[in-house]
Image (cartoon, rainbow, N blue to C red):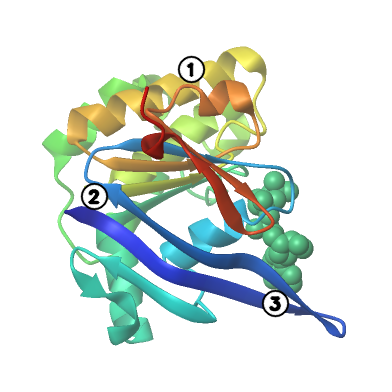
Amino acid sequence: MNIIECKDLTKEYLSGENIVKAVDNVTVGFEQGEFCAVTGPSGSGKSTLLHVLSSLENPTSGTVTYNGEVMSNYNDNQLSILRRRRFGFVFQAYNLVQELTGYENIVLPVMLDRKKVDEKYIKRVIDMLGIEDRLEHLPSALSGGQQQRIAIARALANKPSILFADEPTGNLDGKSGREVLSLLKYVGKEFGITLILVTHDLHVAEQAERIITIEDGRIVRDSKDIHI
Ligand SMILES: Nc1ncnc2c1ncn2[C@@H]1O[C@H](COP(=O)(O)OP(=O)(O)OP(=O)(O)O)[C@@H](O)[C@H]1O
Ligand SMILES: [Mg+2]
């Protein structure tokens, strides 16, 4: 069974007088624990697909099903709870809260959920990501790679089943980008998380078990469908 799937998913935007089909009738599913890269040229609809799949944006038509449940059946409040508890997000720009320390950023999603921090689990995540000595620092005192590792720990804080990552290595130099990518892969496998990673960088995409290529909002290639 797919943990998340979409059927005939379309997302249109109004651009002046024109309608842009950013996602054009996409049907695709992802299994629990798989690592899939979504790649394609700039403007092909990669980020939009990620946003609609993860319910950050509503589709124009079509359905997204998470864990057997059609997401349009949820109201906005239920969707934000689902996102907070079951999905983790990692973006190119890290999006850390500048006034909070590394540790405070990591546990923020748990706090927002008014839950008790699972200290043992958070410590394991922190150890895996190698950020133990960065926890008391503010983001401004951290390198890009360190900030992104804090952001990954934050994304993992609520033990998500899916991690959505949009160009997570886009702001990093080659070496820290490779480190962040292999950490994402590692934590994904350790915790059995589905990793859906958007990138225009083929070297990054090649690290995934599965590569989906998008052009003009449509899937033009899915390595899963190619049998050697
Ligand atoms: N909020 C919006 N309003 C209007 N048009 C949008 C909006 N968001 C995206 N688009 C358009 O939808 C199309 C797909 O955009 P999207 O950001 O998904 O592409 P992308 O593949 O992520 O590109 P990039 O690699 O540059 O990040 C583009 O034509 C874009 O201009
Ligand atoms: Mg994008």
- Residue of label 1: 179
Tell me the amino acid under the disc marked 1: Glu
- Local crowd at mark 1 within 10 Å, few (<14), some, or many (≥20)? some
Left or right, 56 with reference to 125: right
Q: Residue at x 21, y 73 (%)?
A: 69
Disc 2 versus disc 3: nearer the observer = 3
- Local crowd at mark 2 within 10 Å, few (<14), some, or many (≥20)? many
Decide: is 63 above or below 185.
below
Counting residues from the start of the chain, the first of labels 2 and 3 encountered is 3
Q: CA distance from mark 2 to mark 3?
A: 29 Å
Label 3 sits on a secondary structure element that is strand
The tag on residue 13 is 3
Q: Position of residue 52 (x, y in %)?
A: 49, 67
Q: Residue at x 31, y 76 (%)?
A: 71
Tell me the amino acid under the disc marked 3: Tyr
The tag on residue 161 is 2
